[in-house]
Amino acid sequence: MTPIRYRTTGGYDADFEVAIAADGTYTVEGGSYVTRGRRTGTLPEADQTEIDRLGTAVEARDWGAPEGSEGFVHHLEVGEKRVLWWGPAADVDARLGALVAALGRL
C-alpha cells in the first residue's frame, strides 16, 4: 500500500499522529489527556485496500487556515502527495473526511 502519515497539532498541546508503512504496519501516537497513547499493529488486508483507495482519491492541496484562526492544524502525506488544512476534514473535502475517519479508527 502507499505509505501514509497523518498528524494533527493544536490546542492544549494536543498531538495525534498515524503512520502506516507500505507493508501495512502502523503506529498511532496520541499526546493529549484524551488519547490512548502509543499503539502499533498491522492492518488486515481489507483495511489496507480500503485506506489505500481512500488515500488515492485525496487531492494534494494546501487549504491552509483562515486568517486569524487558532486551533488544530492537520498535515497528511499520502506517498508523495501533501495536504494541509485547518478544521474538520469532512468540512474541507468529503474524500479527505473519509480517509481521516478511517485513520481515526486505528
Image (spheres, rainbow, N blue to C red):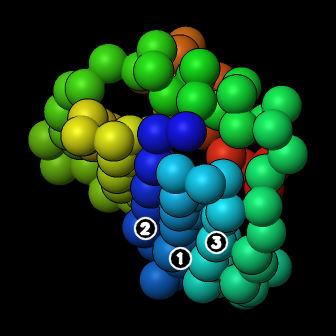
The residue type indicated by label 2 comes to: Gly
Which is more N-terminal, label 1 or label 3?
Answer: 1
Instruction: Determine the CA span between mark 3 and mark 2.
Output: 20 Å
Q: Residue 82's x, y, as percent? A: 24, 40
Q: Which residue is mark 1?
A: 14
The residue positioned 70% from the left and 28% from the top of the image is 49
For the residue pair 86 and 99, the one nearer the viewer reads as: 99
Q: Are marks 3 and 1 in contact (CB under 8 Å)?
A: no
Q: Helix or strand or loop: what does disc 1 sit on?
A: loop
Horizontal side of residue 82 vs 86, given as left or right: left
Residue 73, image quadrant? bottom left
- In the displayed structure, would residue 62 be above or below residue 67? above
Q: Helix or strand or loop: what does disc 3 sit on?
A: strand
* Label 1: few (<14), some (14–19) or many (≥20) C-alpha neighbours in 10 Å: some
For the residue pair 15 and 70, the one nearer the viewer reads as: 15
The residue positioned 38% from the left and 40% from the top of the image is 78
Which is more N-terminal, label 2 or label 3?
Answer: 2
The residue type indicated by label 3 comes to: Thr
Q: Residue 35's x, y, as percent? A: 75, 76
Q: Which residue is mark 2?
A: 10
Q: Are marks 2 and 1 in contact (CB under 8 Å)?
A: yes
Q: Helix or strand or loop: what does disc 2 sit on?
A: loop
The residue type indicated by label 1 comes to: Ala
Instruction: Determine the CA span between mark 3 and mark 1.
Output: 17 Å
Q: Which residue is mark 3?
A: 27
